[in-house]
Image (cartoon, helix red, strand yellow):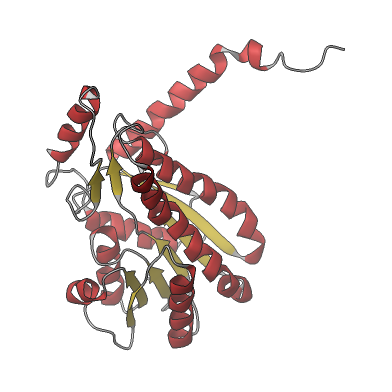
């Protein structure tokens, strides 16, 4: 790994976030880690030290995010890599999920990411350097039955990352959006997953899909330690990718989506092109 840098990581008490924190600290990097539960974070990753600053942060609260960015910059004088990892899964059809359940999901998965970007960009602009890495999901490229709202939040992360990359390029800031497939983390446990409180019996296919996914818990093919290493490696590259698919399942699903889009777009090409005023 190249010279010491400062990494700001959200959702760091478990999953990819915790793997990233441990690998980076072992490599002698400076790490600012956030979680909504400081005790849980410290128990998992360790107490504050010369190279480590654990913080309790409410990502849905701009003031809380701003205070965390200020604390990080005050301690380490620079923020070089920002990894927006915090988020959770939410299952259910759109009809089944309440307005509150849906909005809470967007508040964390989308607006939490946006809050961090908004508050850290002044630091990165002043430095004229930095790398923002947003953890989305393969569901943000191609969703599956029963996870519409989750897919919508991750599609949002993919979309904002694509445009953000153009918006901040002139400041020397790079952007990568990561789309993982199924990894053996706590994602499919009650700690990281919400299922609609008021299921509707008519949605049999949704229930079947949820059962299929929940039965996968603990046997997912993806190794989170390898994923963390891959993310660290691309952050150190001269020209990091805008998109990073992690896992064979993610890669195969993304390629299948490309084929589907091409077929769907071309199916009505003549109609699409016939919208101009007649000469």
On the picture, is 196 further left or further right than 103? left
Note whether residue 193 is visible: yes
Residue 57, given in percent of the width and then of the height, sits at: 37, 71
In the current view of this chain or complex, which residue is farthest to the right? 279
**Residue toward you, 186 or 128:** 186
**Residue toward you, 99 or 247:** 99
Question: Is residue 57 positioned above or below 146 on the image?
Answer: below
**Residue toward you, 222 or 207:** 207
Residue ID at (32%, 88%): 50
Residue ID at (42%, 58%): 234
Q: Quadrant of the C terminus?
A: top right
Residue ID at (42%, 37%): 141
On the picture, is 102 further left or further right than 80? left
Q: In which quarter of the image is the N terminus?
A: bottom left
Question: Is residue 209 positioned above or below 187 on the image?
Answer: above
Residue 122, given in percent of the width and then of the height, sits at: 60, 72
């Amino acid at each position: 790994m190249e010279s010491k840098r400062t990494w700001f990581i959200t959702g760091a008490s478990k999953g990819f976030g915790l793997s990233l924190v441990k690998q980076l600290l072992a490599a002698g990097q400076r790490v600012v880690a956030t979680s909504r539960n400081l005790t849980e974070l410290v128990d998992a990753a360790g107490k504050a030290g010369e190279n480590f600053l654990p913080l309790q942060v409410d990502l849905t609260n701009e003031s809380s995010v701003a205070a965390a960015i200020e604390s990080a910059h005050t301690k380490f004088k620079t923020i070089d890599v920002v990894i927006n990892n915090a988020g959770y899964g939410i299952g259910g059809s759109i009809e089944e999920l309440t307005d509150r359940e849906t909005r809470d999901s967007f508040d964390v998965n989308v607006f939490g990411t946006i809050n961090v970007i908004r508050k850290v960009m002044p630091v990165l602009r002043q430095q004229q350097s930095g790398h923002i890495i947003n953890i989305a999901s393969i569901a943000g490229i191609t969703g599956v039955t029963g996870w519409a709202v989750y897919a919508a939040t991750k599609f949002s992360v993919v979309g904002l990352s694509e445009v953000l990359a153009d918006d901040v390029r002139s400041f020397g800031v790079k952007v990568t959006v990561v789309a993982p497939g199924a990894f053996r983390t706590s994602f499919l446990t009650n700690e990281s997953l919400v299922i609609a409180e008021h299921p509707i019996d008519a949605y049999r296919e949704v229930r079947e899909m949820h059962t299929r996914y929940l039965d996968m818990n603990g046997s997912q093919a993806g190794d989170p330690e390898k994923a963390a290493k891959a993310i660290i490696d691309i952050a150190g590259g001269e020209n990091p990718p805008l998109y990073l698919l992690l896992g064979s399942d993610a890669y195969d699903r993304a390629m299948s989506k490309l084929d589907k889009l091409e077929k769907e777009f071309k199916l009505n090409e003549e109609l699409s092109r016939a919208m101009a005023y007649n000469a």
